[in-house]
C-alpha cells in the first residue's frame, strides 16, 4: 500500500475492482509532489486555490469518466440486453457535469424543472432525460411532456395530470411507474426510500389499480417500472432482492395485456468516505443487478427488458475535493482543539444533516507527520457546523489548505447561502489544466433577488 497520508491510504490499483472510483477516498489522479503538495488532475491544489480562491470545489474529470465507463463496461459484460445508464443529477446538477455524463453516453435523471433545464442546456437530448419527483408541478410536467422526456409517474394526481397533458397537445408521453418495493436497507433513515413508509411512488398494493388505469389510457406510452431503495448502500443483497420484485411487476403487467419493456433499478451504490467504509465496486454492483434480472426473467420465460439504473453518488462523489483555507484555532485544554476553515455547512451540509464522516489532509503539508487530533469547524454561526470531528492532522498554520475528499455528491447541489456566504467556485481539472465550471458567487449575486419595499428606503 502507498501511504499518502497517515489518515488516507491510496488503494493500489492491482485489479479492476481496486480502481472502482467509489472504493477510493481520493480521486483517481491524486498524487503528491516531491515537496509534499497534493495534486489532483495534474494540478496542485495549493495553486488552484491561489488562482480561484477558497473554498474551492475541485472536480477531477478523469474520475467521473472512469466511473461512467465502469458502469457502461460492466453492463456490457453482464447484461445481454439493452441498457441505459442515467446520471442522477441531484448529486450535482450543473452544465459541465451534465455535459460530461452525456459525452460518456449516459442519460440524465432530473427531479425538478431546474435540473431539467440544466440538462437540456447542457445539450442532453430530451429522449435521454428521465423526470422523477413526488410532487411535480403542472408547469414542470408540461415542460417535460413538451420536450419529450420520459416521466416517472409517482402518484395518482400526477397520472391524471400527465393524461390531461397528452390529451391537450396530442403527444404520447413515455411513462414509467414508480413503486415502493418494500425493501429495507441499512443507511441513514433520511436517505432510505425503498421501505413501505416512504413518500415516494405507489405502494405495491396499488399496482393492480395502476394497471387498470394504464389500460384505460392508451394515449400514454407505458414503458415500464422504476424503483429506488436508498442511497449510500454498501450491501448487495437489497439490490439483488429488488431485481426479483421489479421483474414480478413486469409479469403482472404482461398478465393484463400490458407488455412493458423497461426496468429502472434506481441508484444507491455507496462510496468510501473514510477508511472503514467498504462499498462494493461498481462492477460488483452491476453484476448483481444483471444476474438478478436475467435469472428472474429466465424463471418466468420473460424476454429481457431494457435495463436502466441511475447512480449519482458513485459516479461523482469521489471525483471532487473541497479545498479550504485554515483560519483561527481554539484550544480547550484536556478537551478539544478546534481548527476553523473558511467554509462549512453552507458548502457541505452533509455532516450536520446526516452526521456524515469525511477524510481530509493538509494539501501543502503532505509530507509532514500528523501531530495532533483536531476538530475542523466551519465559519457559520452554529455550534453544529463541524466538518470533521477528531481527525489527525499535521500541525496547521493559518493559510494552510485543508482539503476534504469525497465532496462531489450532494455538496454543491445542497449548498446554501446560510449566513450570506457566497457559494464557492468549482473548477474542472484534467491533465494539468484547470477550468472554471461554476463561478464563485459575489455579494452582488447574494443581493440580486433582494428588493427594498419603498417605505423602507431611507
Ligand atoms: N434515483 C432516485 C429516484 C433517487 O432518489 C436517488 C437519490 C438516486 C437515484 C441517486 O442515488 P445515489 O446513487 O446517489 O445513491 N442528500 C443525500 C442523498 C439523497 C439521495 C436522494 N436520492 C446525501 O447527501 O447523502
Image (cartoon, rainbow, N blue to C red):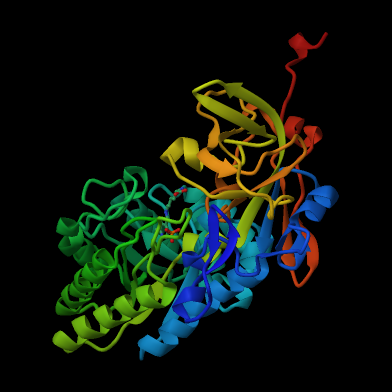
Residue 109 is left or right of residue 197, and the answer is right
In the image, taking residue 340 as reference, residue 260 lies left or right, namely: left
- Residue 325: image quadrant is top right
Location of residue 394 in the rendering, given as x and y in whole percent from the top left corner: 64, 44
Task: Name which residue lies at 82% across and 54% down.
Answer: 47
Most foreground residue, 367 or 455: 367
Q: Quadrant of residue 429?
A: bottom right
In the displayed structure, would residue 448 be above or below residue 290? above
The image position of residue 424, as x and y in percent, is: 71, 44
Quarter of the image with the C terminus in it? top right
Asked whether residue 300 appears in the rendered view, the answer is: no
Q: In this rendering, is residue 361 above or below 447?
A: below
Which is more toward the observer, 390 or 405?
390
Query: Which residue is located at x 71 percent, y 43 percent?
Result: 55
Spot occupied by residue 305 in the image (x, y as percentages of width and height): 31, 83
Position of 352 compared to 417: left or right?
left
Residue at 21% x, 68% y: name it.
Answer: 241
Question: In the displayed structure, does residue 428 sit left or right of residue 64?
Answer: right
Amino acid at each position: 500500500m502507498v501511504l499518502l497520508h497517515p489518515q488516507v491510504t491510496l488503494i493500489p490499483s492491482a485489479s479492476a475492482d481496486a480502481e472502482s472510483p467509489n472504493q477510493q477516498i481520493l480521486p483517481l489522479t491524486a498524487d503528491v509532489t516531491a515537496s509534499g503538495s497534493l495534486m489532483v488532475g495534474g494540478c496542485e491544489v495549493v495553486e488552484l486555490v491561489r488562482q480561484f480562491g477558497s473554498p474551492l470545489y475541485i472536480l477531477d474529470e478523469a474520475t467521473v469518466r472512469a466511473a461512467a465507463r465502469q458502469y457502461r463496461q460492466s453492463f456490457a459484460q453482464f447484461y445481454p440486453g439493452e441498457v441505459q445508464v442515467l446520471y442522477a443529477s441531484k448529486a450535482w446538477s450543473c452544465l459541465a457535469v451534465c455535459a460530461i455524463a452525456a459525452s460518456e453516453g449516459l442519460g440524465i435523471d432530473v427531479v425538478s424543472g431546474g435540473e431539467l433545464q440544466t440538462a437540456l442546456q447542457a445539450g442532453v437530448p430530451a429522449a435521454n432525460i428521465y423526470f422523477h419527483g413526488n410532487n411535480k408541478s403542472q408547469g414542470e410536467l408540461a415542460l417535460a411532456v413538451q420536450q419529450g422526456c420520459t416521466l416517472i409517474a409517482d402518484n395518482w394526481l400526477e397520472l391524471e395530470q400527465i393524461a390531461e397533458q397528452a390529451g391537450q397537445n396530442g403527444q404520447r408521453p413515455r411513462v414509467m411507474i414508480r413503486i415502493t418495493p418494500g425493501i429495507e436497507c441499512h443507511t441513514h433513515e433520511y436517505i432510505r426510500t425503498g421501505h413501505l413508509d416512504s413518500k415516494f411512488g405507489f405502494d405495491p398494493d396499488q399496482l393492480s389499480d395502476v394497471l387498470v388505469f394504464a389500460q384505460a389510457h392508451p394515449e400514454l406510452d407505458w414503458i415500464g417500472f422504476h424503483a429506488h431503495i436508498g442511497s449510500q448502500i454498501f450491501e448487495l443483497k437489497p439490490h439483488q432482492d429488488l431485481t426479483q420484485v421489479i421483474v414480478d411487476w413486469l409479469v403482472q403487467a404482461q398478465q393484463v395485456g400490458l407488455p412493458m419493456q423497461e426496468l429502472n433499478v434506481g441508484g444507491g451504490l455507496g462510496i468510501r468516505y473514510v477508511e472503514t467504509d467498504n462499498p462494493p465496486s461498481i462492477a460488483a454492483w452491476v453484476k448483481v443487478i444483471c444476474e438478478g434480472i436475467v435469472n428472474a426473467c429466465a424463471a418466468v420465460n420473460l424476454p429481457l427488458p431494457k435495463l436502466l439504473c441511475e447512480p449519482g453518488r458513485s459516479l461523482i462523489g469521489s471525483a471532487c475535493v473541497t479545498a479550504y483555507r485554515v483560519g483561527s484555532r481554539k484550544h480547550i485544554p484536556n478537551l478539544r482543539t478546534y481548527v476553523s476553515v473558511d467554509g462549512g455547512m453552507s458548502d457541505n451540509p452533509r455532516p450536520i444533516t446526516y452526521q456524515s464522516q469525511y477524510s481530509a489532509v493538509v494539501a501543502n503539508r503532505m509530507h509532514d507527520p500528523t501531530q495532533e487530533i483536531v476538530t475542523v469547524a466551519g465559519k457559520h454561526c452554529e455550534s453544529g457546523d463541524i466538518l470533521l470531528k477528531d481527525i489527525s492532522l499535521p500541525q496547521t498554520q493559518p493559510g494552510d489548505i485543508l482539503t476534504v475528499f469525497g465532496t462531489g455528491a450532494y455538496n454543491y447541489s445542497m449548498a446554501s447561502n446560510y449566513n450570506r456566504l457566497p457559494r464557492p467556485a468549482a473548477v474542472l481539472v484534467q491533465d494539468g489544466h484547470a477550468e472554471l465550471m461554476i463561478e464563485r458567487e459575489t455579494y452582488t449575486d447574494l443581493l440580486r433577488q433582494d428588493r427594498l419595499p419603498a417605505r423602507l428606503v431611507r
